[in-house]
Image (cartoon, coloured by chain):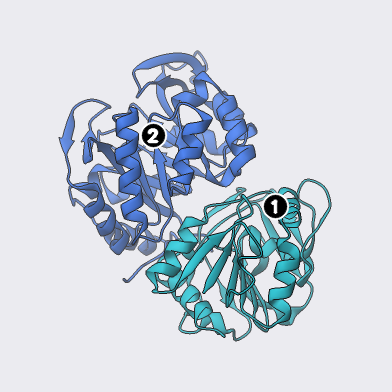
Amino acid sequence: MLAKRIIPCLDVKNGRNVRGVKFSADIDAGDPVELATRYDAEGADELVFYDITASSDGRGIVMDLVQQVSERVFIPLCVGGGIRTYEDVRAILKGGADKVSINSAAVLTPEIITRSAESFGSQCIVAAIDALRRPHDGNGTPGWEIYINGGRKATGIDALEWMEELVMRGAGELVLNSIDADGTRDGYDLELNRAVAERVDVPLVASGGAGTTEHIYQVLTEGQASAALAASIFHFEDYSIPEVKTYLSDRGVTVRHYTP
Amino acid sequence: MIAIADYGMGNLRSVEKAFQFLGHEAFITDDPQRARDASHLVLPGDAAFGDAMRNLRTAGWDTAIEDHVSTGRPFLGICVGLQLMFATSEEMGQHTGLDLFAGRCRRFPAAERVPQIGWNQISVQQPCAILDGIEEGSFFYFVHSYYVEADKAEESVAVTDYGLTYTSIAARDNVFGVQFHPEKSQKVGLRLLANFAALN
């Protein structure tokens, strides 16, 4: 049976792993290569490197890290942050990443998804979104709006419609980051995940808000997510990956247990 | 020496790195002539079946693979590499493959999320040299929208469930194909590649 995935995310700035709260203040959380190696030994199902400097210098640093990690770590590696062009996508895949996560660039130039998926295959094109809740409309239906530039700029685009378009353009997987929940450790936005799960058929990765093992359990069951991405709870060793996986399998969720 | 066929498709470096990590000499080449003397040949792949087959034929990989296999040297197809080893595919039109295995490549039914992305288990149907030391039910990393339907039960070495039960490892003599990515499947994946590299 297909296992639910646990994906630690490393937010990299100037070669260090940092973690923001609601997209702002950064806290130093260690050396990314060391962390990646630790997560691999603990049985992470995949690793995401997120370049939060999002400059050409930052890209070079992140790709060096991916190079170093990929010499010894044999799980899928995804790189995101600051991707602007098709050439960026090509360079990242050539540099040793298995997947590229595209966010703002897809909003600004949607063809980047279409063209990248055609050239490299949907399996390596991950579309990520940052969504903020809208006030409920008259019918009490929740809604979400797409934000870009690290959650700073509103676009007026409806998140659910946008997700459908991303899939139609060839995104093989979607990462749903809730701005409301990000860094709060109060739990994922379950409603957002469920709403998207009902609209599209590709795998969904929930992101933003994990504080406890129960939150991860909720988003993988009620939230219908295929994978849970988390940063803080792993970096600061609140929980280890095996602890999360044991919690999940004790409650009937299929996960992959790993012994190095 | 392990040759990895480069026909313009997929992340080949990770396959090379995995063999090198295991202490084997491996090299990537886009020239079938350079692979002629290789003891082992690996066909990776991540792209659409039709494009992949066209690129293989244009570069002459189809005959190079045939020659390699006919001399009994070990051959391994990975992901789309496995799919190409089958006779036909219905991915975006009808295509003919390398025809090393009888059967076809089909799209997953809509009941499940497609592509399948993540770690799934294999259920071993036949003993197989590349599975030495690998436990029944081991998890491997899969990424695919199409699956293979093997016509000969004896060539279906392991199966996996995703909405339906399909062949995840096909093998005959020294010819092997795996639907998952062993180079991305941590310890069990490396074990499978080590088993393959140890064949002669």
Q: Secondary structure at mark 1?
A: helix
Q: Is residue A80 above or below residue B21?
A: above
Asked which quadrant contains residue B151, the reply is: bottom right
Query: Which chain is depicted cyan?
Result: B
Residue A170, by quadrant, is top right
Mark 2, residue position: A189
Q: Which mark is residue B52?
A: 1
Specify few, some or many for label 2: CA neighbours under 10 Å numbering under 14, 14-19, or 20 or more. Answer: many
Q: Which residue occupies the foreground of this view, B34 or B127?
A: B34
The residue lying at 51 percent from left, 74 percent from top is B1
Q: CA distance from mark 2 to mark 1?
A: 40 Å
* Tag of residue B152: none
Q: Residue A94, how many percent across, how many down?
A: 48, 45
State left or right for residue A22 relative to residue A248.
left
The chain in blue: A
Please determine whether, in this image, residue A189 is positioned above or below residue A64.
above
Q: Please, what is the three-letter code of the amino acid marked with disc 2?
A: Asp
Q: Nearer the viewer, mark 2 or mark 1?
A: 1
Q: Is residue A21 left or right of residue B150?
A: left
